Image (cartoon, rainbow, N blue to C red):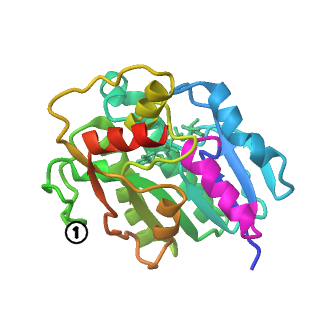
Amino acid sequence: MKQGILVTGAAGFIGSHVSEALIGRGHEVTGVDNFDPFYARDVKERNLSGLRKLPGFRFVEADVARDPMPLDGIEAIIHLAAKPGVRPSLDDPGSYMEANVTATARLIDAARRVGLSRIVFGSSSSVYGNATPAPFAEDTPAVSPISPYAASKRAGELLAHAFAHLYPLKIICLRFFTVYGPRQRPDLAIHKFTDLIARGRPVRMYGDGRVSATIPILPTAWTVSSPRSSGPLVRLPARSRRSIWAAATACASTA
Ligand SMILES: NC(=O)c1ccc[n+]([C@@H]2O[C@H](COP(=O)([O-])OP(=O)(O)OC[C@H]3O[C@@H](n4cnc5c(N)ncnc54)[C@H](O)[C@@H]3O)[C@@H](O)[C@H]2O)c1
């Protein structure tokens, strides 16, 4: 059944893929993004370029934390707008709270005021902090985030829980591990590896390369992360683990 869906962060890496996938399934998508300067607007405009040509897509440049949201005709929200990045959140924690926490509170509140009940929130595996040794146990309580970014994502989840307790809302929080694929954020390792290798430049290795990470691949990440429960929080199994060295080697063989 065709639905009107609001995707926040639609000019971003995951948001642009999700919007395309929804339109491919016959839905109408309203994309919102404020072109946060975390990385270049040009890159985000390129992410949007295919979407802008599709009749089922309309784009609104707006800040989720400050501006009214275009909720007319919307039946569900996929909230992916955020300031990402663990390390940069140490330099400017206040802006992370505004983009990731205030924006989430305002969006959920606006949704419930117009009777919208279905929201998906893009959270992060960083909420586990050091609480669970590799491989991750998704049912470990995420009570000890170790960066402002992680704390902001956990705060978003807790807001979702509080709103779902207070109002008839169904909010699903997806804890993404590092996602990669075309248009991956330029700050992420796989993007940096492939970019350097494609330009014939060496990849600098820090440590001994044995650090490993769980890395789902788009569009698989979205497919496996489809909501499977109406509870306020869903924990999905980790897909695969690779050492950073293996990831760099895989990039080299495909670049
Ligand atoms: N990419 C990953 O591996 C990963 C891992 C864990 C969690 N996440 C989460 O998934 C979501 C999408 O991540 P991404 O990698 O696509 O990041 P991204 O930076 O490419 O996309 C996020 C988009 O949100 C927009 N945005 C930021 N603040 C906004 C605001 N106040 N109002 C409107 N738009 C705003 C940005 O301009 C950007 O285009 C984020 O919530 C991120 O925290 C991503």
Q: Residues within 10 Å of mark 1 (few under 14, many from 20)?
A: few
Q: Kindly identify the amino acid type of the residue bearing the numbered disc 1.
A: Asp
Q: Is residue 240 above or below residue 249?
A: below
Q: Residue at x 46, y 21 (%)?
A: 200
Q: Is residue 100 above or below residue 23?
A: above
Q: Can you give x and y, in whole percent of width and height, for residue 225 in the image?
A: 46, 67
Q: Which residue is mark 1?
A: 139
Q: Is residue 56 above or below residue 196?
A: below
Q: Is 183 in the magenta? A: no
Q: Is residue 192 above or below residue 232?
A: above
Where does the magenta region start and end?
A: 11-28
Asked where in the image residue 205 lies, by quadrant, the reply is top left
Specify whether residue 68 is in view: no
Q: Residue at x 41, y 76 (%)?
A: 231
The residue closer to the viewer here, 50 or 174, is 50
Specify whether residue 141 is in view: yes
Q: Residue furthest right?
A: 55
